[in-house]
Image (cartoon, rainbow, N blue to C red):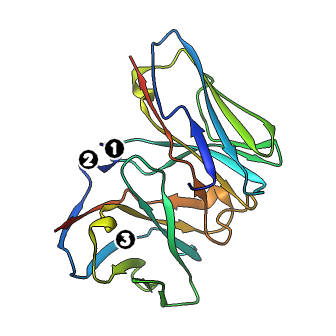
Amino acid sequence: ETGVTQTPRHLVMGMTNKKSLKCEQHLGHNAMYWYKQSAKKPLELMFVYSLEERVENNSVPSRFSPECPNSSHLFLHLHTLQPEDSALYLCASSQDYNGHGRYGYTFGSGTRLTVV
Amino acid sequence: GESVGLHLPTLSVQEGDNSIINCAYSNSASDYFIWYKQESGKGPQFIIDIRSNMDKRQGQRVTVLLNKTVKHLSLQIAATQPGDSAVYFCAENSGGYQKVTFGIGTKLQVIP
């Protein structure tokens, strides 16, 4: 177990559905991230939260809406997605948001999202 | 299987041999580098890191080499085992989360 837990592991949703991805970390880290991982592409940073405040919205479409109710939990709310949004969505945490701290990011196992 | 591993550069190695995985980075200002391992169905996992003031760093069965002149990073795995089969990718950091760049990755296949 990496210390970062993501649920669900797999999600299939229609383009008109609303769903949420959940991430939880108990590492005492202060920063949490959402990344998108698509085939043949590098990891794409979506959102960054530091101490529950959003510090980065990396030009992500509004159909993705993050929420960070406390320093241990992070959500990604999904609404009216497109098929091209199908990907592996990874949550990560780090000691702080100044990039890689020692030992880099701790990633969850991801949610495999398929939009049909 | 994980679609992230499909159509990536692939390295096939016989079990027990040494593996060398290469990474070319783009930013000469990058001063911190990490290698991650991503097994099927899992998220990336930290393997080893190196700062730009070093040329070489060794861990358990792994060695990272940094050549700043040609902006090249390599990961060497000694006595490769079936459990080493995964996608490996490097990350460079030039300061702050905005400047963390991940590579696409190389798929390592270990032949028993």
Tell me: B79 left or right of A17.
left
Circle 2 crowding by C-alpha within 10 Å: few under 14, some 14–19, many from 20: some
Q: Determine the residue positioned at 62% across, 50% down.
A: A4
Q: Which residue is mark 2?
A: B6
| B26 left or right of A4 in image | left
Q: Quadrant of the N terminus of chain A?
A: bottom right
The answer to whether A30 is drawn above or below residue A61 in the figure is below
Among the 4 quarters of the image, the one containing residue A12: top left
- The answer to which of marks 2 and 3 sits earlier in the sequence is 2
- Which chain is indicated by disc 3? B
Relative to residue A86, is residue A13 depicted above or below?
above
Q: Residues within 10 Å of mark 1 (few under 14, many from 20)?
A: some
Give the labeled residue for mark 3.
B23
Dot placed on the residue nearer the N-terminal end, 1 or 3: 1
Secondary structure of the residue carrying tag 1 is loop
- Which amino acid, mark 3? Cys
Q: Could you tell me the amino acid type at mark 1? A: Glu
The residue at which mark 1 appears reads as B2
> Of helix, strand and loop, which one carries label 3?
strand
